[in-house]
Image (cartoon, rainbow, N blue to C red):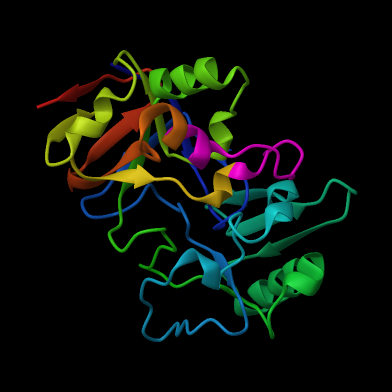
Amino acid sequence: MRVEHLFRYPVKGLTAEPLARAPLAAGETLPWDRAFALAQGDAPFDPAAPRFLAKQNFLCLMKNAAAAAVTARFEPATGRLALALPSGEGIEEDALDAGGRERIGAFLTRFMGAQARGQPRFFHVPGHAFTDQKRKGVSLINLASLRDLEARVGAPRSLHRFRANVYFSGLPPFAELAWVGRRLRLGTAILGVFKTITRCPATEVNPETAERDADPVAELRAHYGHSDLGVHATVEEAGEVAVGDGLALL
């Protein structure tokens, strides 16, 4: 098996950033993956005691399809986060600075319009990741599974609908769903697969148009009898992964 694509998502719900390689630390996500999030004003998120909250508490594609139109680029060396809209409007600020985060939050709140609840706040809490499950980790999708789904529905389904960190080749469709409880070597790191990824309405959003134009959850259920695509894994032993690296079960 081979790693074909590698992505991080610096801001929860916003666009992916392609990576050529990334270090993997035990018990962590990819560096800067889901490091920032816009919490709705009614979300019970406390930066002094950060904890997992369901995605509905944040700007997210499941509830806010238009978020797919916001391009995000983050530069770790400087802390600068640049956001851009299709209209050409944008903002660039130091996302590691409280004032910069306040201005980013105001920009995204204006963009959300009526979908903003209360006074949303833009957060970064060192050591906390705004993941979609309680355990930090890495998400992986077998490209053969995605291609098989596309063949059955007779239409393309962009890999960006599914927002994984690692896309790999070299395995029969959906064979990865049997990996739960198994360990694998990803590049030079060792991971433990702890669950399959059950898909949600976020996948309805076309990443190119920011419109809901398909229902992959229903498509998966109709063709396979489940709504799973991909797996979640925790990093058990640190290492590094790069596009082109091997992936193997242990």
Residue 190 visible in the snapshot: no
Q: Residue at x 53, y 63 (%)?
A: 36
Outermost residue toward the left in this view: 250
Q: In terms of secondary structure, what is the magenta stretch mainly?
A: loop
The one of 209 and 224 positioned closer to us in this rendering? 224
How many numbered marks appear?
A: 0
Membership of 112 in magenta stretch: no
Q: Is residue 13 above or below residue 158?
A: below
Residue 230 visible in the snapshot: yes
Q: Is residue 169 above or below residue 95?
A: above
Q: Residue at x 22, y 46 (%)?
A: 235
Q: Is residue 24 above or below residue 178?
A: below
The quarter holding residue 1 reads top left
Horizontal and vertical percent for residue 41? 62, 83
Compared across the picture, whether 121 is left or right of 27 comes to right
The one of 243 and 140 positioned closer to us in this rendering? 140
Q: Quadrant of the C terminus?
A: top left
Q: Residue at x 75, y 47 (%)?
A: 69
Q: Is residue 211 above or below residue 208?
A: below
The quarter holding residue 136 reads bottom left
Compared across the picture, whether 224 is left or right of 190 comes to right
Outermost residue toward the right in this view: 87
Membership of 215 in magenta stretch: yes
Horizontal and vertical percent for residue 237? 15, 43
Horizontal and vertical percent for residue 101? 64, 73
Compared across the picture, whether 197 is left or right of 115 comes to left
Compared across the picture, whether 145 is left or right of 26 comes to right
Horizontal and vertical percent for residue 140? 35, 35
Q: Which residues are magenta?
A: 204-220
